[in-house]
Amino acid sequence: MSNSNPAPAFRPLYQQIKTLITQSLISGEWRPGEAIPSETELAARFNVSQGTVRKAINELADENLLIRQQGKGTFVASHTEEKRQFHFLRISPDQGERVYPKGELLSCKRTKADAATARLLEIPAGATLVTITRLMRVGAEPVCWEEIRLPAAIFKGLNAAKINQYGCKLYSMFESAYSVRILQVAEQIKAVAAEPAVATLLGVTPGTPLLRIERVAYTFGDKPVEWRRTMCNTKSFHYMNKIV
Amino acid sequence: MSNSNPAPAFRPLYQQIKTLITQSLISGEWRPGEAIPSETELAARFNVSQGTVRKAINELADENLLIRQQGKGTFVASHTEEKRQFHFLRISPDQGERVYPKGELLSCKRTKADAATARLLEIPAGATLVTITRLMRVGAEPVCWEEIRLPAAIFKGLNAAKINQYGCKLYSMFESAYSVRILQVAEQIKAVAAEPAVATLLGVTPGTPLLRIERVAYTFGDKPVEWRRTMCNTKSFHYMNKIV
DNA sequence: GAGTGGTCTAGACCACTCA
DNA sequence: GAGTGGTCTAGACCACTCA
């Protein structure tokens, strides 16, 4: 008689250690920016060799959850760090230095999730959303208009004051105020004609081609926590991407 | 007296092994699709431990130069493989299965490099280019129009017949006919209005917003070997990207 | 059953940081 | 000089592939 079940799923030790470390990151045992215990300490704690801990930490560092620094230690990645700010930002000026755009909050209100958004955020249709719109400027020039939809169940009490308190830096706020860390995003990009309302805000004539970037952002366990649509005037900016 | 020279540059053994393996890949000692010697054999050949070879191979596998398969061996990556075909293709239909578009060659001729293209391809301005245009269709529907510029010095004797011989699959042809392997690409994306000529080919009205993707493709040693501009009708397709 | 890559250990030593 | 992560070795054993 053949075995109809799949194989009993061999799971390497270092994978199990990886899960344990991730759980400590989720639980907040080690906070963003802080150092985690040394490899030797963790090896003693988990009763495995240092090499096994190394392999687990290396993978977590590859996934940008941890940051290794020779001679200093291993640190929990944080969105408040300068370098992390740029990580998910793909809009870059055609000429000159890359700068972080300044966000200007336009609105923040409660709405109900339509079917499509609900599906992407894996919440029930009709669930409450926090819907934010903002304008992103480089210098005085408006470059992107954004609409952001968040599950209200996760971002309790979020309002305009709180957003402004964090200088409109949403992922920093997610991390500091809600312990929600964005680990990866998936984007779908199209070229579309500017609608009148957005055209006015971006200072272009209606019908001007704009880059439309739709993003779903994920936290631990591939859980979606943000939907975002960016309408970008690419007259003197572009979306950059490297594929290896 | 202080030493004004930089430190004597410590270079780990596994990095040196990595360079040696890469040289064998460039020289063609192991051809795309073939297996390279086992870790034990390479360890003996280079007089290091198997662990050091492992680390070198792992990094080359991360860079998509080699493909590991437990129980079988380690293989040289090839563009002719099904999976590799999709690697640099980011255009995807909004609904349904992802398919590889069919290329239709429009033209292939010699031109002179303008200053901007020459700079990106790191060749002298005025150097000879092979300039190719083609239309990419999914089913009968035209989706992208592409212009590709290649340094003629690298792609000797390239012509329309040769391109058609490879079914318009350029990276497969680069690899098979010119031993040029594309390892990474950098893209810049904008939204632009369709010009009349391209609009006609794509079956849209002039002024329709199109996605414009400009790509530089690199081979070993970060050497640029291709410039390409794609004009894409994103009515029912999009550019997809994941950021981790 | 022979051969491959994958995991795990234990231990030595090195590069780097900081006080 | 103490403590961190980084490299390297040697060896045991495991998971997987193929004939």
Image (cartoon, coloured by chain):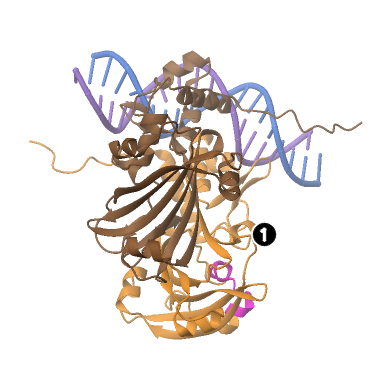
Chain colours: A brown, B orange, C purple, D blue
Q: Is residue B159 above or below residue A208?
A: below
Helix, strand or loop for the magenta stretch, by majority: helix
Q: Nearer the viewer, residue A233 or B143?
A: A233
Residue A63 lies, in percent from the top left, at 47, 38
Q: How many marks?
A: 1
Give the structural element (helix, strand or loop) at label 1: loop
* Residue visible at 31% across and 26% down in the picture: A72
Is residue B70 one of those drawn in magenta? no
Q: Which residue in the rendered view is the most extreme toward the right?
A: A1
Q: Which residues are magenta?
A: B163-176
* Residue visible at 33% across and 43% down in the picture: A85
Give the quarter of the image for residue A83: top left
Q: Nearer the viewer, residue C17 or A213?
A: A213
Give the quarter of the image for residue B194: bottom left
Image quadrant holding the N terminus of chain B, namely top left
Residue A59 lies, in percent from the top left, at 49, 34
Label 1 crowd bin: few (<14), some (14–19), many (20+), radius 10 Å: few
Residue B45 lies, in percent from the top left, at 52, 44
* Camera sees residue A200: yes
Kind of residue at disc 1: Gly
Q: Is residue B16 above or below residue A212?
A: above
Q: Nearer the viewer, residue A227 or A187?
A: A227
Q: Is residue A63 above or below residue B191?
A: above
Give the quarter of the image for residue A71: top left
Is residue B174 one of those drawn in magenta? yes
Relative placement, left or right, of A13 versus A185 is right
* Camera sees residue A98: no
- Residue picked out by circle 1: B96
Q: Nearer the viewer, residue A145 or B12?
A: A145
Q: Chain of mark 1?
A: B
Residue B88 lies, in percent from the top left, at 53, 60
* Residue visible at 44% across and 81% down in the picture: B195
